Image: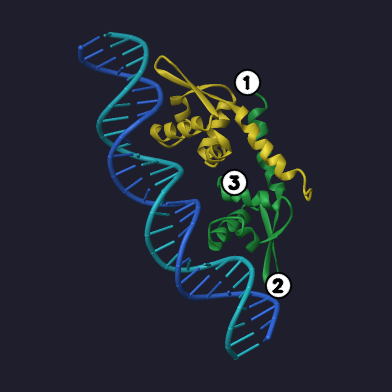
Chain colours: A green, B yellow, C cyan, D blue
Amino acid sequence: MGIQNTMRALSDPIRREILNLLKKGRMAAGDIVDHFEVTGASISRHLSVLKEADLIRDKREGKFIYYELNASVLEEILLWIADLKGEKNND
Amino acid sequence: MGIQNTMRALSDPIRREILNLLKKGRMAAGDIVDHFEVTGASISRHLSVLKEADLIRDKREGKFIYYELNASVLEEILLWIADLKGEKNND
DNA sequence: AATATATTTAACAATTAGGTTAAATGTTAA
DNA sequence: TTAACATTTAACCTAATTGTTAAATATATT
């Protein structure tokens, strides 16, 4: 969904921490909430920002909604940074 | 300065575009301003955010203040992303 | 069907961010 | 020293972000 969405999603420390949690595998929303000191509603909106950026995917299973990391989106950022660092004075 | 400052600095499209301009070499503030449609004051604040994040450095030369890219800070982000993508299910 | 559980959505308040214009600062040149 | 130029800082406004509580939705259980 574009680098803007991705960067914006990554600009919040709670959202970055959520991604870190999901590194180890998928988690239900409630378990994610337990790792933070803000309300479930607040985390829920952070999750929706991450989802909009396609950094996570969700899947309902019964009462629970599981979230999992989709790190592939970060490729675009890696490219952007590589380009920036890459060729200096090359025009 | 921390990953938070860096991510926050990168989350704005104008600031990312400024970094792109500086990729080719250093530029005076006024020349940077000319590339955008917002006021000089606005760009000046963007520059200060980038400077706080240590993504750029400035040097006054007479009337002009030249800005140059400091891409080394991006290393931290590369590491963060690598870590996120890296080892899945490794605990 | 009623209740309990998991999660999201809505409505609102507080804070932060980004833009503008006007004033201030630093430097050069007349 | 005054004027002109380059840039930043201050004051202000509006919009976006983040958090809260309360209500809504979806599912499971009794």
Q: Position of residue C17 (x, y in %)?
A: 46, 43
Quadrant containing the C terminus of chain A is: top right
Label 3: which residue?
A: A10
* Above or below: residue B81 compared with residue B89: above
Q: Name the amino acid, label 3.
A: Leu
Label 1: which residue?
A: A89
Q: Quadrant of residue A66?
A: bottom right
Q: Name the amino acid, label 2.
A: Gly
Q: Residue at x 57, y 50 (%)?
A: A14
- Secondary structure beneath dot 2 equals loop
Asked if disc 1 and disc 3 are in contact, CB closer than 8 Å, the reply is no
Q: Position of residue B87 (x, y in %)?
A: 77, 45
Give the mark nearest the N terminus, 3 or 2: 3
Q: Name the amino acid, label 1.
A: Asn
Give the mark nearest the N terminus, 1 or 3: 3
* Above or below: residue B71 compared with residue B38: above
Label 2: which residue?
A: A62
Label 1 resides on the chain identified as A
Q: Are marks 1 and 3 on the same chain?
A: yes
Left or right position of C21 against A15: left
Asked if disc 3 and disc 2 are in contact, CB closer than 8 Å, the reply is no
